[in-house]
Amino acid sequence: MNPPTARPAQPWWRTAAIYQVYVRSFADGNGDGVGDLAGVRSRLPYLRDLGVDALWFNPWYLSPMADGGYDVADYRDIDPLFGTLAEAQDLIAEAHGHGLRVIVDLVPNHCSDQHPWFREALAADPGAPERERFWFLPGRGEHGELPPNDWQSYFGGPAWTRTTGPDGAPGDWYLHLFAPEQPDLNWEHPEVRTEFESVLRFWLDRGVDGFRIDVAHGLAKKPGLPDVGPDPDVTDLPYQDVDAVHDVYRSWRKITDGYSGDRAFVGEVWLPSPEQFARYLRPDELHSAFNFEFLCSAWEFDAVKDVVDGTLAAHARVGAPPTWVLSNHDTIRHVTRYGREDTSFDMGNKRLGAPTDRELGLRRARAAALLTTALPGGVYVYQGDELALGEVESIPDGLIQDPTFVRSGGTDRGRDGCRVPLPWTADGPSLGFSPDGAAQPWLPQPADWAGQSVAAQDADPHSALTLYRTALRLRRDRLAALPERLDWLPAAPGVLAFTRDGSFACAVNFTPHPQPLPPGSTVLLASAPLQDGRLAPDACAWLDLPAPTRTDAPGADRRG
């Protein structure tokens, strides 16, 4: 595969713009109302022209879809809902032909309850070898009626489900940190490690360029599976960030290093401290990880500056590139979040119900898009970000499919609101998501999305889509080759300004009033029109600076 044009000689993943494809909601090729690989293949030119470097695909494996494909029954096959293995191989090749690399999701913490291993385990007697690949334990209490420990599922309720024997008698319990249909694998078992090393090679041999590791911090568990207790230390939980997990990634890194083409890992690592986070990015472990601190940050000057400083410092310790993320398939879309009084994000909270100022959220989202694409490192774009789509908060209860809705008793509306199928055209029953005359999309689209469709924004010079295309082109042509550092520039209170090399600068106005730009600067790109030559409120601008720019002026803060 030829690398994308204008890409510097350093490994591609250090500066890549990566587009997240939630296959089920991207494009429907066969007319059943569900996105599929045929739909993605038909839209590859769109993704190429958007200006991204790589595509990350959420799980496309064989699955009962109890959790949107994160319950995997076969890691070496494609679910018929999406297509076939042959289509996946064709998609990888065609993406490469467009200069797009391919990252696939890997789910190693748990599998599906329909995976052959787990079906064998359920059929086996207590204590049988087939059960040792999972966490089967007898319950506590006089009759084993209580779970083995006090761990709770991320989706609500206990993290344990009790089995039933052939005679109907209750048996041992099994661990699932997510839904009961997602039993946790026991990474102390050698067959588990061998199997996933084989799965890595299976997809690497088919040309994938990397893997996104689901729940990367959660594979290993503390010996004995101790209770969390009533007042847990969030930096020392028994089911996350256990030291043994790092040996797994060191062995995986040896595998990818044996392939040509700079194959890479990106980890989903939700941890409370930057010191814990950085350990996953040591030179012999994962190449990169999602920056959830930035995603969760409030849209406020101090909060954003602190998280940028903290991110750069944490990654510098291990020589890894930072990543910048605004939304994904698990989080409320940032256009909606930025229009609320509380603009921060807390996983599992603030999903629905808070009043939202759409226009305010849109202004801030446009500014955030330029900020993230200007920062050093990699950037992720969740499908629909480039269209400035908001969270869909009107999905009827009967259509919600996210297991968190049921597991929480309906108190958590779940993540379906950010997974609604994309609008491609301004008319038609599915806004171009499916072919004419096809089934309705698997989740309903809001009627006002017609005005936010690709067709409606394509030729509009002021649209979010045009802003993303322009920013990603400039980023590839100019910013990707800049040093992986930044220097803070003196600016008015409430204005965040930095330069990457003394000639390019980025400025963000977090205040409610227009603010002056650096003297002598020239605007390359702005998220909103200037107001009397000043940067508008909640706006971001990319700037050419006059030479020389004194980054050592009083008040400047150098980072490197």
Image (tube, rainbow, N blue to C red):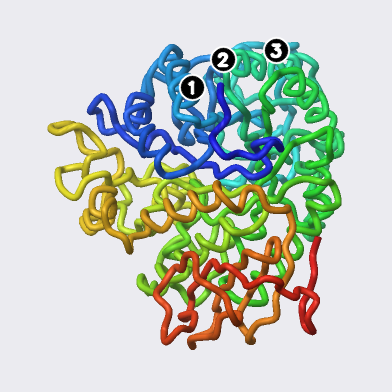
Badge 3 vs badge 2, beta-carbon distance below 8 Å = no
- Amino acid type at circle 2 is Arg
Q: Residues within 10 Å of mark 1 (few under 14, many from 20)?
A: many
Position of residue 207 in the picture relative to residue 335 (left or right):
right
Confirm whether residue 160 shows in the render. Answer: no
Q: Position of residue 338 (x, y in %)?
A: 48, 69
Residue occupying the point 52% across, 62% down: 370
391, 322: nearer the viewer:
322
Residue at mark 3 to residue at mark 1: CA–CA distance: 35 Å
Give the vertical position of 418 relative to 354 (above or below).
above
**Which mark is first along the chain, 1 or 3?**
1
Residue occupying the point 29% across, 38% down: 442
Residue at mark 1 to residue at mark 2: CA–CA distance: 8 Å
Name the residue tied to disc 2: 206
Give the quadrant of residue 362.
bottom left
- Amino acid type at circle 1 is Ile
Residue occupying the point 28% across, 56% down: 452
Name the disc covering residue 130, or none: 3
Task: Assign a secondary structure to mark 3.
Answer: helix
Screen quadrant of the N terminus: top right
